[in-house]
Amino acid sequence: MKKKILAVLMAATFVVGTLAGCSTPTSSVDDKDKNTDSASTSSNVIRYSLTAEPPTLDPQLANSIPSATVCYHLFDGLMRNEEGDVKPAAAESYEVSDDGLTYTFKLRETYWSDGEKVTAQDFVYGMQRLEDPATASEYAFIGMIIKNAAAVNAGEMAVEELGVSAPDESTVEITLEYPAPYFLSMLSNAQFMPSRQDLVEKYGKDFAAEPENNVYNGPFKLTKWAHGDRITLEKNDKYWDADSVKLDGAEILTVQEQATAVAMFDEGELDFADVPTALSANYEGKTTPYYDGANDYIMMNQSEGSPLASKNLRLAINYALDRENYAKLSHDGIYAPNTRYVLPQVSGLEGEYGDEYPYEAFPLKGDPDKAKEYLEAALTDLGAAAASDIELELLTGDTEDNKKEVEVVQSQLQETLGIKVNIKQVPYKQRLQMEADLDYQMVVTGWVPDYPDPISYLELWTTDSSYNHAAYSSETYDNYIKVSNTTTDLKERMDALFAAEKTFCEDGVVAPLQLRQKEMLTSENLKGLKTYFVGINYDFVHAYFE
């Protein structure tokens, strides 16, 4: 299904201006001569927009791509993932034990933006804070790979028992529950960044809520945050590799509608902008495509008392969807329809996971007859007399693109199943909170992998995961994940992950919709801007203007 198209899109990375030496394919606007004639930037500050401001810039609480992307530029972890090339960052070197369980990092001499030295204890504290139940981080699940993390997060062990320590001020030692070849790439994620205990304790719940309520050890520092309007970054002269940072700063505006952002780009007010699919034809030949890794789906709340606790109803919805038509109507066929859960382009044993484990969980065009069979069984589950007795609410964000997507879903489900679907639009931050609170029935949401391995998708859905926002619980699924986490046989591990994906889809936990391809406009003098399909959207650390 769309295999060749996705292989091209998977310019798993895309570089604006320069071709960087890296382990994944790239494409360059310079090579294609596709830039527009927008006004050049007079200052050395890169300007772009987000449709909603990041919900938080607290690294241990970061729970979205906007938050993760900004944190990537504010903080420096032990390692830094640049287009799949994982390099030592705040760590100068590292060693891995023969059993693959213990990682020892030697820190280079680095400083926070206030001049204080970054110590090993700052990294230890950051990871302890991530798993501390008092922090209540939704992203605590990502640290479960660290020894004793599950017990610490459950309140069964003290945070000091977490498998991370500082033998001295320049050494960080991390012990894992099981070997994980992808662990180094995880350390580029916001949640594993260092944090200053003195500032967390000083500001409490307001830590990182304003620029002055935190300090930064990355390429940039936060200097202004006009909530709802813009975030201002300035180059961090205390950054250990500051000489490699050519920009003076960044202005990240909040512009709800992408069409408005494109108009601002055309007026020279932004240096790059994603083109909404509805406007793609207007910019043909002037954009560069990139694949942002997002796998969009309908998540269904299975909490007790919810009509979607009925597996039959969830499967009826899955088989009722014509994903090919959905992609055409909602995004003019630019996004690729998706019929499985795990992103096919993450790593398998030797190649891409999707090539090694091909799978179509649901028919591309749907199967109305099968959908109606499952609906009949669902009516019995729910004690309903007719399909018209079933009324569901579909939650989404508050942009025009969001509205367009859910209206297509609404139409397909109502026409094929005869059920009633009501649409609810809320701001992005509110939508995330409603998901976390299980305060919804169905929601159009999605996932971008935090690292290029199938477990980055599958670890969300274990019964005890802090990010299990569907109230899904399956002993079979949990056992497959347990096997993947404990076996030392790489083939057995990948087989278990594939079995978990199939179980997940057969249970109809989500309804896969699409894989996002973006079209980007860039100022002709902007060079070195990168995108990557893992963890973040944009990397402008080494971007510059000619």
Image (cartoon, rainbow, N blue to C red):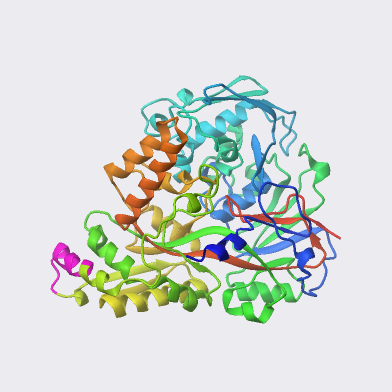
Q: Where does residue 161 sit, x and y in percent of width and height?
A: 46, 23
The answer to which of 231 and 311 lies nearer the viewer is: 311
Circle count? 0
Name which quarter of the figure residue 77 lies in. top right
Q: Main secondary structure of the magenta part?
A: helix
Lateral position of residue 400 relative to residue 525, left or right:
left
Task: Relative to 465, say whether 163 is above or below.
Answer: above
Name which quarter of the figure residue 187 lies in. top right
Lateral position of residue 464 relative to residue 285, left or right:
left
Q: Where does residue 326 sit, x and y in percent of width and height?
A: 44, 74
Task: Relative to 494, say whether 442 is above or below.
Answer: below
The answer to which of 335 and 379 lies nearer the viewer is: 335
Task: Relative to 478, say whether 471 is above or below.
Answer: below
Residue 384 within the magenta-colored segment of the rendering: yes
Magenta span:
374-385
Lateral position of residue 416 relative to residue 402, left or right:
left
The answer to which of 443 and 515 lies nearer the viewer is: 515
What residue occupies the far top of the structure in this picture? 167
User: Residue at horizontal 57%, vertical 45%?
Assistant: 58
Lateral position of residue 47 relative to residue 456, left or right:
right
Q: Where does residue 509 sit, x and y in percent of width and height?
A: 33, 56
User: Residue at horizontal 28%, vertical 56%?
Assistant: 302
User: Residue at horizontal 35%, vertical 43%?
Assistant: 462
Whether residue 61 can be seen here:
yes
Q: Where does residue 403 sit, x and y in percent of width and height?
A: 46, 75
User: Residue at horizontal 47%, vertical 65%?
Assistant: 1
Whether residue 51 can be seen here:
no
Quadrant placement of the C terminus: bottom right
Residue 134 within the magenta-colored segment of the rendering: no
